[in-house]
Amino acid sequence: MLDNAHLMRLAGRFARRVRAWAADNAVPVIDCTAGERKHLVAEEYLRTHSVGPGVFLILVARAPAMVWDVRRSADGTVLGGLARKRTYVNHYSFHIMDRAWGHLVIKMAGHAPFGAQVILNGHEYVAIAAQGEGIGFVKEGNCFTETTDPAGLAQIADTLSQDAAAGRLGQVIDRWIYTACLIFGLDLADQQRTCFRYAYSNYQAEYSRNLLFAYGGHMDRVFNAMLDRTRSRLDIPAVRTLFGARRRPGKYGMRPSPRVGVVLETPAWDLTVFKVHFGLLTLKGYTKGARVLRFEAITHNTRQLGCGRALDRFPQIVARLAGMCQRFCTALDCVDIGFLPGGTLDQLPLPGQLGASRVGGIDVNKPRIRAALAAVLALAPSPDGFTVADMTAKVHAMTGQAHATYNTRQAAYDLRKLRAKQLVAKPARSRRYYLPGPAARAISALLTLRDHVIAPILAGVKIRRHDHVPARLTPIDQDYEHLRTDMATLFRHLGIQPGPAAA
C-alpha cells in the first residue's frame, strides 16, 4: 500500500539513519542555514582535521527537489501513478575522501526518489595521479603553479578528456552513491529487490587553461593592459570593481554579474576576474596566485552545448568547452591588438561582391555602419557565433535605438556588406556568423582609429591647453596632448584651418 504517508516515513527513516550512523562513527552532521557557503565549511574542516577514505562530513540544508506524489482512486484501492512534485526538502551533502579522486561531494535528497548531485574536481584527480607517478608539483587551491615534469602532468590531465574518462567517472560514483548515501533510504537488499539504479548525466562543467608567468609583475601588466583595452570594445553594460571584498560575489553575498555582460572584480586576495556571459555559458579570465593567469569556459547547463548530457558524452562536452576557451583567448587577443592592412581605408568604401550579388561599400563615417561594426566586435567572443537577431539586439543595447529605426532586415544587409569585405564569416548551410581573427583585428583598429584617434585630435586641435594642462597626466593623456600639439603644427604647415572644436 504505497501512499504519501509511507513516503514521509521513508524520509524520516533516512534522516534518523544518517544521524545514528554519524554518531556511531564520529562523523559530524552540521545543519546549515540559508545562505551558508557549504564548501567553505568543508574546507575549514579539512584544514583542521586529518581524514581517511570514506565519508568524513555530512552537511544538511533545505533545497528544492522533485519528490514523488502518490495518486490513488477516491476509495484509495487503485494506484493511479506516481506524479512528480517540486518542493523544499532536506538535502544531505556527503563529503567523501576517495583514494583516486580526493575530495568529492554527493548531495542527496532525503525524500524518494532520492535525487542526487555529484561534485567532482578534476584537479584533485590529477594531483593524486601525479603523486602516484612521482611527479613533483606545487598546487595552490585547484591550480598547479609549478611542476618538475610539465609534459607528464599534461598527459595525466589529458586522460580526463578521453573516452575512458566517462568510465572513470561512473566507477567513482558507483563506488560511493549506493553504499555510502542511498543505503540510508534503501538498504542493499531493497536496492536489489527494487532494481533501483541511477542514470548519470552531466549538468555543469568547467574547463580551464593556465598560463604560467616567470614574474608576477609582468603578468599583472599584461592582463591589466588587456582589460583596459578590451572592456570598451566588448560593450560592457556594467563594470563593477569590488575592493576589499571578503568573499566572492554570489547568491547570498554581493550581487552577481548580469547574465549577459562583463564583470571586473578585485577582491581582497588580489584576484582580478574578467567574465563574459552568454546566457548559461560563461567565459572567464583571472589571475590565480602570484604568477598564474587562468582562462575558463563554464557551462551552467550542458544542454546549451547541444552535444547531449549523458555521462558517455563527457568527452564531447570537454571538447566543446576546450574549443570555447581557445576561441575566447583568440578573440581577446584579436580585440586587444588591432591591425589595419595597407589600402583597407581605400577599399572599404568601394562596392563589394557577395556571390552573384553586388553590395554597397562600408563608410566608417556613417553612424549606422559604426554601430554594426561595434556590435559585431562585441559579439566576437560568443561561443557559438551569433545570429542576425543577436546583432540587432546588440545594436539596440549599444545605441539605444528601437526596432523601428534599426531592424533585422537592416542588420542582415549590414552583415552582407561585412561578408563582402571578409570582415564577417558565415559557414555554409548555417544561420550563424562568426568573426575571424584577422577581421577582429581590422574592425578593432578601424573603430579605435575613428573614435579614439581621429575624432579626439580633430576635436582638440583648436583648444589651447597651455593654461589648462593638469599637473598629473596618464600615459594616454600624455599621448593625446603630444598628438594634439603636433597635429596643430602639421595643420599650420599644410595650410589647413580646422573647424571649431566640438563642445
Image: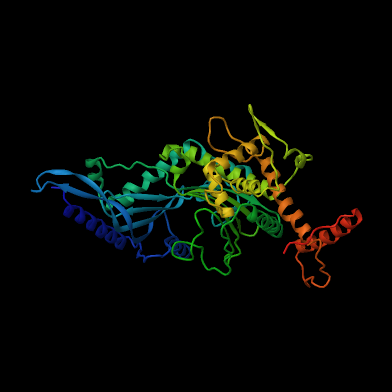
Q: How many marks?
A: 0
Left or right? Give the position of 210 relative to 498: left
Hey, which residue is sitting farthest top in the picture? 356
Report the coloring of the rendering: rainbow
370 vs 159: above or below: below
Front residue of this view, candidates 181 and 209: 209
**Residue 134: x percent and y percent?**
58, 47
- State which quadrant residue 80 falls in: top left
- The residue positioned 53% from the left and 39% from the top of the image is 319
**Residue 7: x percent and y percent?**
20, 52
Quadrant of the image for the C terminus? bottom right
Left or right? Give the position of 66 relative to 499: left
Is there any visible trace of residue 241 in the rendered image? yes
- State which quadrant residue 189 falls in: top left
Left or right? Give the position of 66 relative to 428: left
Front residue of this view, candidates 485 and 264: 485
Front residue of this view, candidates 295 and 462: 462
Left or right? Give the position of 121 relative to 498: left
Hey, which residue is sitting farthest left in the picture? 75
Front residue of this view, candidates 40 and 271: 271
**Residue 414: x percent and y percent?**
61, 41
Hey, which residue is sitting farthest right in the picture? 493
**Residue 446: x percent and y percent?**
71, 47
203 vs 354: above or below: below
Is there any visible trace of residue 153 in the rendered image? no
